[in-house]
Every structure is written in C-alpha cells, then in structure tokens.
Image (spheres, grey):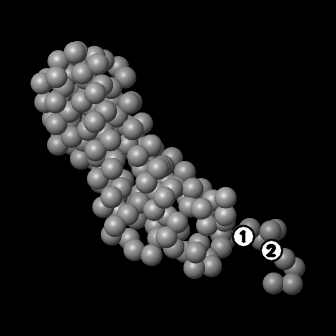
Amino acid sequence: MDQLRRSAWVVAAFAAAGYLAFVVCAFGFVSLFTDAEVIASPDAGLLVGPAIVAAAVVALLLHLGRALRRPQRMAGPVLLAALWTWLAALVVAVVGYSLATGTALASMLFGLGFAVGWFGLLIPALAALVTSFAVLVSRGEQGGARRPRWPWERDEDE
C-alpha cells in the first residue's frame, strides 16, 4: 500500500472514531435537552440504535478511506459523506425494526420517522462536519505539512 493510500486510511480511521464520539455526545445532549428517547419505539429492541450508529460510522469510514486519496475539492466528499451516512442509518433502521417486529409497513414508517427526526438528521450533519475537518487534514498532509513536534523530538541543528 503506497503512502498516499495509507495516510488516507489513517485519517479516515481517526475521523470515524471522532465521528462516533460526536454522535454519541450529540445524541446524549439532544436526548437530555428534549427529553426524548433516541429510539422512540420500545418494539425496536435494544440493538437497533447501536446498529444505526455503527452503520453510519462504517459508511463514513469507507467513504473517507476512498475520498481522502485525492482531497482537492471539499464539497463533493462532504455532501457524499452526509448522504452515505444518512442512507446507511435509514436502511439499518428499517431492516433492524423489521427484524424486531416483522412488519414491513411499520418498519418503513419507523425508519423514515427516525431519519427525519432530530437524531436522524444529526447523523449526516455531524458526518459533514467531521468530513470537512478530515479533508482539511488530508489536504495539509498532501501539501507537505507535518505534525507538530515536541521540544525533545526536534533535531539539535534545527
């Protein structure tokens, strides 16, 4: 694997980990301030919520791993990250609820209701934010920027 692809996947992995932290934090604050449950339907079970978040994180990781190889433009990767994470969350919400309850129409209504609610809209919004930062970091790396060094890491002749 060449250096450019490896660097893209490293930035993508850190961005995905940060995205997971942002989603958990945002879900907690929105739930606390609005007094709403993340998964409003008790019929969904315990695993639908974590599966939705996991699908969004995996979608972002896969998208960024590929998109950060050539980060010249910012709008395309940001919009696609928002789209992919939102679609992944929607599909997993529908499938997860369908597996829990077995009804197709109720699953579609649950998935769409989640996707257009506060929690469903936080997923693409945070993906766009994280992708913006990841693209900036990747562009800086490709432009020759290096990480800051601690004083003991510097060469004596610098």
Q: Amino acid at mark 2?
A: Arg
Q: Quadrant of residue 117?
A: top left
Q: Distance between the Cα atoms at labels 1 and 2?
A: 7 Å
Give the percent coordinates (x, y) of residue 72: 45, 75
Q: Residue at x 66, y 65 (%)?
A: 3
Q: Which mark is residue 118?
A: none
**Residue identified by numbered label 1:** 149
Give the percent coordinates (x, y) of residue 149: 72, 70
Q: Residue at x 26, y 38 (%)?
A: 90
Q: Residue at x 57, y 56 (%)?
A: 9
Give the percent coordinates (x, y) of residue 39: 25, 28
Residue placed furthest toward the front: 1
74 left or right of 106 in image: right
Residue placed furthest toward the bottom: 157
Q: Secondary structure at mark 2?
A: loop
User: Which of 43/66 is in front?
Assistant: 66
Q: Which mark is residue 154?
A: 2
Give the percent coordinates (x, y) of residue 151: 77, 71
Q: Residue at x 36, y 55 (%)?
A: 81
- Contact (CB < 8 A) between labels 1 and 2? yes
Picture layout, residue 4 above or below residue 15: below
The quadrant of the picture occupied by the C terminus is bottom right
Q: Quadrant of residue 154?
A: bottom right
The residue carrying pointer 2 sits among few (fewer than 14), some (14 to 19) or many (20 or more) residues within 10 Å by Cα, namely few
Q: Secondary structure at mark 1?
A: loop
Q: Amino acid at mark 1?
A: Arg
Residue placed furthest toward the right: 156
Is residue 57 visible to us here? yes
1 or 2: tag closer to the N-terminus: 1
78 left or right of 7 in image: left
